[in-house]
Image: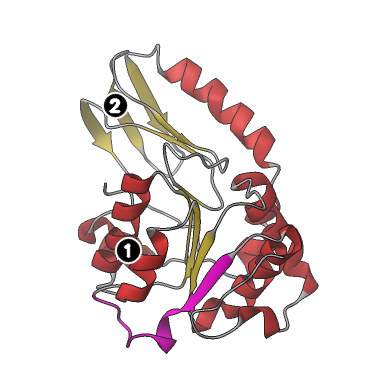
Amino acid sequence: MTIVTHANHPLNTIPFDSELTPGARNAVQVCLRVQPSEKVTVITDDACREIAAAIVHELEKLGCPYRAFVLEELAPRPLVKLPQEILADLETSQVSIFAVQVQRNELQSRMQVTEIVNRKKIRHAHMVNINRQIMLEGMRADFQKVDRISQKVVDLVRKASQIRAKTSAGTDLVADLNPSYKWLKTSGIISPDKWGNLPGGEVFTTPGEVNGIFVIDGVGGGLSVREVWRFAGESSDYTD
């Protein structure tokens, strides 16, 4: 019999809307491909408890061992450093899920997570600022199809010397590329080699040079334009 332990609040006792189930199942079974023998670390907060409860329900259906942490029950927010209890648990896991509404000045604590994830080759789902709308829309995507399309994009851009982006709003950018550049594909199918954001669907690199005009006239993920600029100035959660 699999023994499931809880670090604090037992998320499996929290009721959740069944509409969250398809997205939670996608995260556990398709994106992370969690196996019954694998241990999972689940990190969430007060704002995302219901979503985390839906994810935990899918883990329990698999019968895999996991530990669940609610940040506010371990330390005050904003979280400058991650509690040692969570860091120690990550060191023993093969899979991790970070479903949290982040607060300002918490980048360092997230980098503590990704440092362990990168070092231990953990399959990690970074569900920063996940909410109900994203669970009902983006997390219901066919990620196998997204992955196939993303691979086609990678195959094209690896041969390119330049990429030009133009929009009706006024964006007109030219990025210089080189076939020797490394491209990363985070399509939602997460591997030990690279953790990814969920929902996923990105292909990216660091170009040699970018010139032109970039017009921001809309944002996604529930962020305001001001927050996009703030996060861009702070850093990126893709920092290794």
First to last magenta residue range: 66-80
Kindly indicate the quadrant of the structure image that contains residue 65: bottom right
Q: Quadrant of the N terminus?
A: bottom right
Residue that numbered label 1 is attached to: 110
Secondary element type, mark 2: strand
Residue that appears at 29% across and 74% down: 104
Q: Quadrant of residue 19?
A: bottom right
**Is residue 231 visible to us here?**
yes
Crowd around label 2: few <14 · some 14–19 · many ≥20 (10 Å)? some
Say which residue label 2 marks.
Answer: 175
What amino acid does circle 1 point to? Arg
- The reply, left or right, for residue 232 in relation to residue 139 is left
Residue 193, image x, y percentages: 42, 36
Task: Determine whether 105 is above or below 168 in the image.
Answer: below
Where residue 72 sits: x, y (%)?
A: 41, 86
Tag in front: 1 or 2: 1
Residue at the image point whose x is 53% and y is 66% from the top: 130
Query: Which residue is outermost to the right?
Result: 18
Identify the element where label 1 is drawn. helix
Q: x, y (%) of residue 226?
A: 32, 67
